[in-house]
């Protein structure tokens, strides 16, 4: 009999994850799995819970929630260099990582039934300032949108991503950033720099449509300063993943990236979680095949 440690973020999806906890447990039990359901109590708690589960010999640790829950559980497993496999039941506002694992768009029962037959695969993880990310890391416009969205908790669905984007753009001033990656170097006012292990961020934006979380590299989407009309016209292309042909866009594949902000401290997001580390420079690296992930087919 298999066992799952299920870590639930009660706040995810405006409480949807907490309401689904018994459905998740029942679905695993119907598949002849034993299960422990453990709720988080504060930000960062899932890191501790996942690490403790790994030390106790867990073989599968399931994150129930959105990308924030996945981020914390992954960091807990990676801190322990655990062999336990990360699984996802996507019950959050943002479920970008779930798109990489074959459970996106499925209800609880179907997601669990796919997880119990899923195959563990080795995924890469990015790392910056001592913290891992499994989907994307962003500078510039990305974290500004996260900050706006955090201040608008009443929005749901697609509007929870579109409205903060439009509202943020109205007052956004692209920062001066220096980007250094392998043989690539640029200094200028950047709309955003999104460093991708996965293909999408923000729910609907395909910043790196060719990214592969198993290839040992990060796909960097750099977008330079654009005007309002150009920005609005480009949004659908970013959603389709056809923005690479725009003159303001550069895509770079690299194993290491250094970002410098000559004028202001860096603000960034990791898997949609806002960070203000108070530094003007950081280096982003990738650790190949460091995380076991349950991938349904």
Image: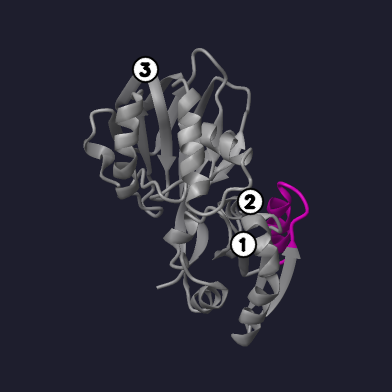
Q: Quadrant of the N terminus?
A: bottom right
Label drawn at residue 187: 3
Q: Which residues are magenta?
A: 39-56
Q: Which residue is mark 1?
A: 63
Of residues 130 and 63, which is closer to you in this image? 63
Q: Can the viewer see residue 142 in this picture?
A: yes
CB atoms at circles 1 and 2 under 8 Å apart?
A: yes
Image point (56%, 52%), residue name: 156
SS label for mark 3: strand
Give the vertical position of 101 relative to 186 (above or below).
Answer: below
Residue 188, placed above or below residue 213: above
- Quadrant for the C terminus in the image: bottom left
The x and y percentages for residue 35 are 69, 76
**Disc 2 secondary structure class:** helix
Mark earlier in primary sequence (3, 2): 2
Colour scheme: one colour
Q: CA distance from mark 1 to mark 3?
A: 39 Å
Residue 234 magenta-drawn? Answer: no
List the residue tagged with mark 2.
72
Who's the residue at 71% across and 47% down the image?
44
Q: Nearer the viewer, residue 138 or 284?
A: 138
Label 3, label 2: how far apart the Cα atoms are: 32 Å
206 and 208: which one is in front?
Answer: 206
């Amino acid at each position: 009999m298999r066992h799952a440690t299920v870590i639930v973020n009660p706040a995810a999806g405006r409480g949807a994850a907490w309401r689904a906890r018994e459905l998740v447990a029942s679905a695993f039990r119907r598949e002849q799995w034993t299960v422990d359901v453990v709720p988080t109590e504060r930000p960062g708690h899932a890191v501790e819970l996942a690490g403790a589960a790994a030390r106790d010999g867990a073989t599968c640790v399931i994150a129930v929630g959105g990308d924030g829950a996945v981020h914390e559980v992954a960091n807990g497993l990676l801190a322990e260099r655990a062999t336990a496999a990360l699984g996802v039941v996507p019950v959050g506002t943002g479920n970008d990582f779930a798109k990489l694992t074959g459970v996106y768009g499925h209800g609880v029962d179907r997601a669990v039934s796919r997880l119990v037959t899923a195959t563990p695969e080795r995924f890469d993880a990015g790392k910056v300032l001592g913290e891992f990310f499994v989907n994307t890391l962003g500078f510039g416009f990305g974290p500004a949108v996260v900050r706006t969205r955090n201040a608008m908790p009443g929005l749901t669905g697609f509007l929870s991503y579109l409205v903060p984007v439009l509202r943020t753009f109205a007052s956004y001033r692209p920062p001066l950033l220096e980007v250094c990656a392998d043989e690539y170097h640029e200094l200028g006012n950047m709309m955003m720099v999104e460093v991708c292990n996965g293909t999408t961020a923000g729910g609907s934006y395909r910043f790196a449509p060719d990214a592969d979380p198993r290839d040992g590299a990060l796909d960097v989407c750099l977008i330079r300063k654009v005007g309002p009309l150009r920005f609005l016209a480009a949004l659908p292309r970013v959603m389709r993943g056809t923005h690479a042909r725009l003159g303001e866009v550069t895509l770079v594949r690299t194993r290491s990236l250094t970002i410098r902000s000559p004028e202001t401290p860096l603000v960034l997001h990791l898997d949609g979680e806002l960070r203000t580390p108070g530094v003007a420079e950081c280096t982003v690296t990738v650790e190949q095949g460091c995380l076991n992930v349950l991938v349904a087919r």
